[in-house]
Amino acid sequence: MKKKFTFPTAYTVILIVMLIVLGLTYIIPAGKYAKLQYDSVNNVFIVEDPIGDIVEFEATQNTLDELGVNINLTRFTDGSISKPVGIPGTYEQLLRPKSSIFGAIGTFLKAPVQGLYDSIDIIAFVLVIGGLIGIINKTGAFTAGINALSTAAKGKEALLIVIITILVALGGTTFGLAEETIAFYPIVVPIFIAAGYDALVAIAAIYLGSSIGTMASTVNPFSTVIASNTAGIDFTNGMPLRIFMLLAGVVICIIYTIKYAEKVKKDPLSSYIYDQKDELEAQFLSNHNSEALPEFTTARKTILIIFALAFVVMVYGVKELGWWFEEMTALFIFVTFIMIFFAKLSEKEFVGEFMAGASDLLGVAIIIGLARGVTIIMENGMISDTILNSLSGAVSNMNGVIFSTFIFFVYIILGFFISSSSGLAVLSMPIMAPLADVVGINRDIIVSAYQFGQGIMSFITPTGLILASLAMVNVTYDKWLKFVLPLVIIIAVLAIVTLGVGVLI
């Protein structure tokens, strides 16, 4: 009997993508733009040309104008732009050092290791969150809270989808809530499974909310602000367009998720992951149907309140205090220490549960590192700038509406290869933004196209966060694609229409 094909795991998918990108480095010519970076210590601009020679220039607006970098000097001096900026018109094709088959193998094997090194801040965050969740699980607080919440939401489960999607989307549009959502899955998945939905509904509520929020970012400093600064415009330019996209996108995502969720509730066989129903219920609801469900005591309520408040503090820290993963991880270590006084576990049990919880998310942490390895191969192969140069050269004679649509698809392609929103902004905006002047449209259309294009890729790209999210609930990538691709098409059409209207008004 022929063995049934099973879709590979997230690890294999990323390794396949890594191999494809490695192959592209032997097909796509190597090349670079000259890069400009501000040295705040010496108050000078440092320009590195494509072959690596470095020249210093006075940090003046005149220098920027002469180099064709149409950005206000204050954007550099106030720290708004800290990464190297591509200089328009400086792309040069370079000779790539010859590499033997052994060199290619070495590159492939070292990229995941380098990716783990480069992602250590995110990985540490994920592991600490996992350890904390393991301790809270042991106290019975999640089980008791889930039982209370599912009882309270009886008959109103769809409202949970609405609330979670909106809240996560607000985080995405304001400060780029993305990797932080990894911590939400162990909490939310059991609630939806207990309500009669499947685990895909939980992933959709959280991940779609985050994706549409970051796609239609309004004041997100890591995409909207830095892209607008690099394009030489104020980040409030184009805001109405992005607010419309945010509102319409959130409504569409909610309706799409609820429609699927209610279909699954009425007929469990219609679930795309029905074959995993028993496995997922055993994993997330092991105690839920037990006759001896833990009581939702004051101590357990306090544990969950402290856990929830940690996220409030995290949001405030990122948005107002400039926190990043080091500070966020330290916050959850602090919360772990607080739990010592409420968990009522012995020292040995406490440490054991923390380690067990961290080990549960080790696979997620490894996936994050592997995904970073894809970007490292591209950078070392010097093909990112070549792709950008090729795509930017094809748009100069288009009319505004066709141009905005083309740029949207350009950023879809670039978004696959460059998953960092700030990295793509500083690399591409100095080259792409001046093209708007040539075509005769406002530069904020370029910023919106960048956000919409890269954002829509986040729904599906294996180099982004989706594989780590799916790994949290052991759902394979093919099942997510089956669920989300119709929605991606709907959102893409909405984005194209929104950009077209933005050109015309």
Image (cartoon, grey):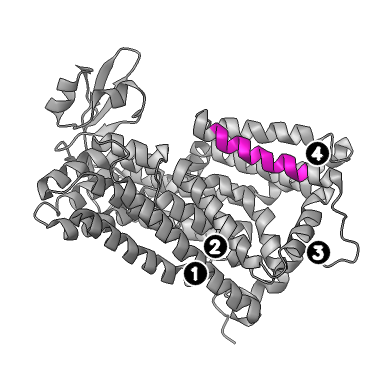
Which residue is pictured at 8% across the width and 55% down the height? Answer: 397
Q: 10 Å neighbourhood of mark 1: few (<14), some, or many (≥20)?
A: some
Q: Which residues are magenta?
A: 303-317
The CA distance from mark 4 to mark 3 is: 25 Å
The residue positioned farthest toward the bottom in the image shown: 1
Q: Earlier in the sequence, mark 2 or mark 4?
A: 2
Q: 10 Å neighbourhood of mark 4: few (<14), some, or many (≥20)?
A: some
Judged by depth in the image, the label closer to the viewer, 1 or 3, is: 1
Q: Position of residue 154 (x, y in %)?
A: 72, 68
The CA distance from mark 1 to mark 4 is: 42 Å
Judged by depth in the image, the label closer to the viewer, 1 or 4, is: 1
State the residue position of label 4.
351
Q: Earlier in the sequence, mark 1 or mark 2?
A: 2
Q: Secondary structure at mark 3?
A: loop
Judged by depth in the image, the label closer to the viewer, 4 or 3, is: 3
**Three-letter code, disc 3:** His
State the residue position of label 1.
256
State the residue position of label 2.
204
**Three-letter code, disc 4:** Val
194 or 454, which is in the foreground?
Answer: 194
Q: 10 Å neighbourhood of mark 2: few (<14), some, or many (≥20)?
A: many
Q: Secondary structure at mark 1?
A: helix
Give yes or no for contact between labels 3 and 2 (Cβ–Cβ under 8 Å): no
Give yes or no for contact between labels 4 and 3 (Cβ–Cβ under 8 Å): no
State the residue position of label 3.
288
Give yes or no for contact between labels 1 and 2 (Cβ–Cβ under 8 Å): yes
Which residue is pictured at 39% across the width and 51% down the height? Answer: 216
For the C terminus, the image quarter is: bottom left
Q: 10 Å neighbourhood of mark 3: few (<14), some, or many (≥20)?
A: some
Q: Earlier in the sequence, mark 1 or mark 3?
A: 1
